[in-house]
Amino acid sequence: MTKASSHAHHNSAPVLRVAHILKSLDTDPPHYFYRFSFTDLNGRRRTLDLPRETSIAKLVRALLAHGLNAPPHEVRALVDDALANEPDNIIGATLRSGWRGEAYIGHRASYGAGASKLLGSVREPALRCRRGSLDDWKAGLHAPCLKSDALTFSICLAFASLIPGLLGIERGVLFHLWGEPEAHISVCSRAAQSVFGRARKVDVSANTLRPGTVAERCASRSDLLAIFDEIRLDTEMRKALIDAVVHSVDAAPSKHANRSKRLELGWRTMGLSTSEAPFGRRVRGTELQHVDLPVLPMSAGGIFNALAEDDDAGDLAAQAEETVEANYGIAFDAFIRHLVDNQAEVKAAAIDLQMRFVEAVRKRWKVFDHPLASAFGLVFAASVIATRAGTTPWRGVTHVERVVVRLYRRALASSFDPVGKVDFLLALLALARAAGCLPHVEKSLAIPAGAVGIRRKLPTHGECVLLRRDYLHTFWPDARDLDLVIEELKARGLLVLAKRGRINTIQAQVEGVSSRSRYYGLKASGVFADVPRAA
């Protein structure tokens, strides 16, 4: 045995071997690659894909540069030995991750019969990592998710990004969480990332991302969720995000299979971005490209909108962060296997659940936006499928159903101009009255549980609807939006005004409340008139 081969075989696995010969499925004519498997300087097994036509000298330099654990003067002999024992089998490979036929090509592994490999040059390091257990991931995120619509929804988005490829949906949607920096919004990004792989803050950060590299991030995440945490929004970046997430690019054959050419292959993705500012208003009646989801201010809990009196938002955020530090990438493996093994059932269930969601919100709200409802319906469908597959931190579909409906309602309220916002509020109040959630309450009576406001006869204005500002704040966390709503209510003559036409809240005494609370007063005769239907 030669010195080189002795060095190669002193462990159970050789220091260097050719694991596969890969045939690129993206080029015409096809290109071929060696997938080298080797031990690095840290004692870990790694793979490196290099074109088959690469010279021996360049192979040696590339392997040394990637940490091959061998003395430089021995590497040539190790390469010669590996090439002399190359395998006979040839495996298909691609630069585009995601669904290909009935198989799914992932960054860590491929799933399904006849699945090809993903060329190593485009495999994201964070997405190749997995750690911990599914049970620990679910247990650690269980309590934070039950207290946070935004956190639950972000995890739902991660699962939902795997569904469009099954249904043949090519256009993506960007969901944008925004709010105060202290509101723990980055926890949502990291939790969503933990479904797929390692979820450090640096793995999701987009703070230094340039508009020209947005497409690269999306291309590396075809049929996955592209995450842009703490992104700096300007006109150029907004356009780059919409172009990359929503429009993607048409697939086109490449003559050379290398990193830059993968952009020609196209991709399909959904997006999650976060920042301190809203993405921008969408004009009603236009195609859906982005969805603004405002987060409550930190004074109201930030992302944790369902805090009990003894809950602490900081503790819940820390628990979620500690969980995703120690457990990641496990939920994806379980969910994608469920999708691959049950494709016909999953497709039928996704279509049915999405349609049921759309019809339910159409019947429930006079103000209706079909593209927005369809987008949320897809997220709802995926979350139900993932819940039933046992891959989510919550048990049962009731929690996630309520979350998706609440955030659809908030997105609907945020997406309109002031006229549309007031139309939405009037539709909401009409529904609340019909459901018994807007009762008539005299001074001697307490407000029933579940009431969103009260009705009371005022001496100077007759029957009025009294609403607290914090209730309106749940739909419009940004004070600027809420002020626009109040101004539009005044312009329509619906708002009870103070002297000289000034906007002011009014005091109302309610049984069981120690101090006289302040409310906005709306004239019931106008509030419950016919509500306009929005696009």
Image (cartoon, rainbow, N blue to C red):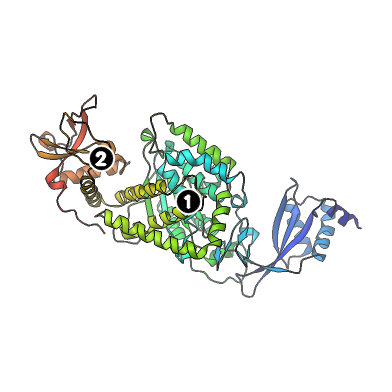
Quadrant containing the C terminus is: bottom left
Quadrant containing the N terminus is: bottom right
Query: Label 1 belongs to which residue?
Result: 387
Q: Report x, y in % for residue 22.
A: 68, 66
Q: Is 78 above or below relative to 53?
A: above
Q: Is residue 58 left or right of residue 534?
A: right
Query: Label 2 belongs to which residue?
Result: 452
Q: Is 241 above or below relative to 178?
A: below
Residue name at image x 86 percent, y 52 percent: 7
Q: Report x, y in % for residue 208.
A: 51, 47
User: Which residue type carries mark 1?
Assistant: Thr
User: Which residue type carries mark 2?
Assistant: Val
Q: Nearer the viewer, residue 204 or 337?
A: 337
Count how many numbered circles sit on residues in the image: 2
Q: Nearer the viewer, residue 407 or 228?
A: 407
Q: Is residue 331 left or right of residue 398?
A: right
Mark 2 secondary-structure assignment: loop
Please rate how many residues cluster around mark 1, counting C-alpha atoms within 10 Å: few if below 14, some from 14 to 19, many from 20.
Answer: many
Q: Residue furthest bottom?
A: 29
Residue 278 appears in view: no
Q: Is residue 453 left or right of residue 293?
A: left
Q: CA distance from mark 2 to mark 1?
A: 30 Å
Q: Report x, y in % for residue 406.
A: 34, 47
Quarter of image, res 123:
bottom right
